[in-house]
Amino acid sequence: MKSRSLGVMILLGLLFAVTPGFGQEASEAELAKKTQNPVSDLISLPFQNNLNLGYGPENEVQNILNIQPVVPLSLSSDWNLITRTILPVIHTDWPIDGNGLGDLNISLFLSPAKSGKIIWGLGPVIAMPTATDDLIGSGKWSTGPTAVVLTMPGRWVVGILANHLWDFAGQSDRSHVNATLIQYFINYNLPDGWYLSSAPIITANWSADSSRDIWTVPFGGGGGKIFRIGKQPMNAQLQAFYNVEKPQVGPDWTLRFQLQFLFPK
């Protein structure tokens, strides 16, 4: 209960730090590129829903809603600090049948305020054991490095984000955390705020019991659009991924839908 309360308090603190401005100065094209840049100066609140199909030993369904506030902070005229938080809300039929919170994940990227053709960010990532059930969380405090690099020539936004986690505290009877995440992203922006996108998340669990269970490698993509409800700019996207490599109980397919509230300065 304490870990769950800690996770909720941290999330609420980040949300209260958001001071939205609803100006329409930014065009849909500009907003699209900002949403595709993980270290842009755009405050946003994405709700990313991942529906995993063919999950578990009996090919069941798992749904993970990631609440992902992004809050950039200006440290000086030369440097920004971008905070990216992920709080998973999980419904699963296996290994438990029910709902709960997963482990809270916070990434901090130090990034130049004025970038050239190559944009980058570097910093730490930390995972906190906020899961409401042992079977949907690690039970460990973990940390490690994270980095992102990208470029935005013309209508394209192309880059890669990666991190690695090692545990340093937590329940002594739980498996060690030794995990890699790699997300490449390729976006092509079309007129009127439409865009094509492919942003699969590749993971490796180096603590897996079997070498067959280390990698999850999805392949796929989709598209999205920037639009407005009144003065509020929004970003909606839909992507589908097939796992060409996965653990024995991993899902065959993932359908990802994201709705993102945008707060340009």
Image (spheres, grey):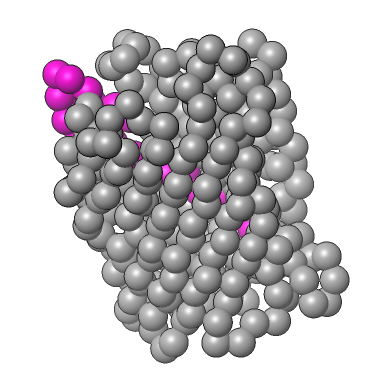
Pick the front one: 105 or 155: 105
Q: What residue is drawn where x is 83% and y is 65%?
A: 75
Q: What residue is drawn where x is 30% and y is 43%?
A: 215
Residue 130: x %, y % from top left: 59, 23
Whether residue 212 is visible to the viewer of this picture, yes or no, is: yes
Residue 52 lies in the magenta-colored region: yes
Pick the front one: 143 or 149: 143
Image quarter where the N terminus lies is top right
Q: Quadrant of residue 77?
A: bottom right
Which residues make up the magenta segment? 42-63
76 relative to 71, above or below: below
Residue 207: x %, y % from top left: 41, 32
Residue 257: x %, y % from top left: 33, 47
Whether residue 44 is visible to the viewer of this picture, yes or no, is: no
54 relative to 67, above or below: above
**Total number of numbered labels?**
0
